[in-house]
Amino acid sequence: MKILFTFYVPSGGVETLNRLRCESLQKNGIECHVLYLMAGTGTHNSVSFPVFITPHDEDIRSILNTHHYDAIIVTSDYLLLERLRRLGYGGILIYESQGLGTRSEARNVIIESVPYLQSYCNAVLIPPTDHLLELFIEICPWLQRYVIPNLVDVHEFQYIPAEAPVDPVIAWVGRLEPNKNWSEYLKVAYHIRQAKPNLHLWMFHDPGLAAEDQKAAFHEELHALGLNDRLNVFTNIPNQMMPVYYSSIAASGGFLLSSSVTEGFGYAVAEAVCCSCPVLSTDSDGVRSFITHNITGKFYPIGNVEAAVNEGLELMNNTALREAIRYQGRQHMVTHFGFDQYAHSFREMMNSFSIF
């Protein structure tokens, strides 16, 4: 069995997902390749499978003709479905819904994709995310649906003991764009700093994925809140180095804040939980699969800065609760998001298309 996964660019959660699932599937006898249409920061991550990076029809056609894939998983880019058929691919095409933004944005994308799904696609693959499942049932009731939880590398992502930072850290991971809601992160950090004057802010993001207006708005708000002297920005950190940072955040007495409007899964949050780094998050849908309030993490209502501040301070000050959340979060990830579960579910999906 030979599978091709495709996406726009090797960056963010989808690059992580592709890397992990290809490693998992290959250990279970499924050969995997990945195609990206442009280069990205994730190319720094080492992999044990072929990765193609090209936007050109002639290159993609050559890849298809050379490897004769049993199935292709097309993540997010519904236009590529038609393109692959035009380039001669006649096998199983599965559209994967990941990272479509807010519920309204996801709805618009799915509606726009309907002609392509009807004409070129055999099924849709989604994580167990309520809003995506509801939208596909409503908009594409005729389309076969497969729901498979994303996987997390619970072996590489674990707490790494080291010297703790002197001051507490509130961290944020994402892109400077509205759905990631960076503005709320700054507001929450500003108010927590009133109670924790020595607070530091760590932000992990890729400037190359940020629009210029978002960069300008970010710097304006950062300086207006007087936080510029407390901020460390980390760019293009290889994914395999993130356990060191998550562990440092945990050791500092701080936490990861996820302020997203909507998440299909939320890889940064899941990986932080794996590393026993406490997480305070909006109820952004996808993270429900691994956050239970006050058990494996904390939720706050999006837009309610006061509630976020109160939850964040409790996470920093209530040592017993903090340690229970750290332990229980790690245990939940180990139990539910290992490699073997994904490979078993993926093979079942392929078998349903008589691919063995």
Image (cartoon, grey):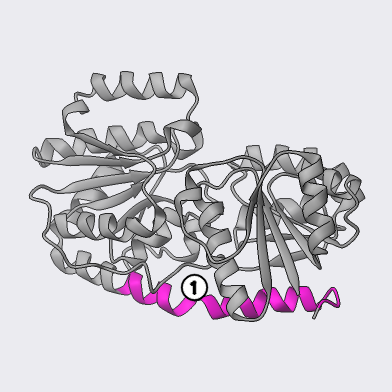
**Above or below, comparing residue 199 to residue 67 in the picture:** above
Give percent across and percent down for residue 30.
68, 75
User: Would residue 327 be found to the left or right of residue 106 on screen?
Assistant: left
**Above or below, comparing residue 336 to residue 284 in the picture:** below
Q: Secondary structure at mark 1?
A: loop
Q: Which residues are magenta?
A: 328-355
Give percent across and percent down for residue 354.
86, 78
| Crowd band around label 1 with a 10 angstrom C-alpha radius: few (<14), some (14–19), many (20+) | many
Q: Give the amino acid at mark 1.
A: Phe
* Front position in the image: 11 or 262: 11
Give percent across and percent down for residue 293.
36, 62
User: Would residue 167 be found to the left or right of residue 66 on screen?
Assistant: left
User: Would residue 289 be found to the left or right of residue 116 on screen?
Assistant: left
Query: Which residue does the image show at 23% across and 67% down from the upper left?
Result: 160
Asked if residue 65 can be seen in this view, the reply is: yes
Q: Assess whether residue 200 is covered by the magenta stretch.
A: no
* Front position in the image: 267 or 46: 46
